[in-house]
Amino acid sequence: EAGVAQSPRYRIIEKRQSVAFWCNPISGHATLYWYQQILGQGPKLLIQFQNNGVVDDSQLPKDRFSAERLKGVDSTLKIQPAKLEDSAVYLCASSLEHSRGYEQFFGPGTRLTVL
Amino acid sequence: QQQVKQSPQSLIVQKGGISIINCAYENTAFDYFPWYQQFPGKGPALLIAIRPDVSEKKEGRFTISFNKSAKQFSLHIMDSQPGDSATYFCAASIGGGADGLTFGKGTHLIIQP
């Protein structure tokens, strides 16, 4: 079974520029999550989708971050304009309910450096 | 507000020893407590998870101990191996794991040969 795919793996941009990340979840997984992992910290949830609807975006800085999940499959996360403090790894995860509950599978992440 | 506190921040254990990482949570609505392992350049991978209706769960060399009254849970790695060297995160969630995870800050574990 293929895992969660993310691209690009690395991006370096200047502050105030815009950037977008792409995620393709595991086939059949209805729930998709975006997390931000700052160096030396645990991942922090930014947004959760159930199919193509938003379940939780309470920690998403909506003045600069946006996310969409068209057709309930792939998702994109955008930052516009980027700030220095946005430097982090952006992780995408997907989950599926099974007999033991839910398990979130993470992609390799996109490492963003804002200069 | 940090809802999941993890300690220690770093840990060095000799090969064959027992590695112990502890976490404490504040939100009593949490009902799913997983541990994730992360290697450099990779995303976190689920190791083992527990729900509050049991006090212990064991899978191979990995054991979670859960104390609901103290709002604490811990990961024990028995017979620690150099390949276990990684960063470990505890996490918690509501809705049996369906909701987004709240992570601890992580423990950098080094197993010395």
Image (tube, rainbow, N blue to C red):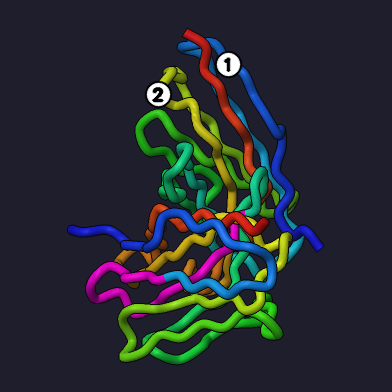
Which numbered tag is attached to residue B13?
1
Farthest residue, direction top: B113
Q: Magenta residues?
A: A22-37
- Quarter placement of the N terminus of chain B: bottom right
* Residues indicated by labels 2 and 1 sit on the same polypeptide chain: yes
Q: Write down the chain letter for disc 2.
A: B
With respect to residue A32, does A84 lie above or below? above
Q: Secondary structure at mark 1?
A: strand
Relative to the observer, which residue lies in front, A86 or B113? A86
Residue at image position (53%, 73%) is B99
- Residue designated by label 2: B83
What is the quadrant of residue A9 in the picture?
Answer: bottom left
Q: Amino acid at mark 2?
A: Gly
Q: Residue at 44% across / 34% down in the picture?
A: B62
In the rendered structure, the residue with mark 1 lies on which chain? Answer: B
Between marks 2 and 1 in the image, the one whose residue lies nearer the viewer: 2
Tell me, yes or no, whether the highlighted magenta stretch contains residue B7: no
Magenta includes A33?
A: yes
Circle 2 Cα neighbour tier, 10 Å, few/some/many (<14 / 14–19 / ≥20): few
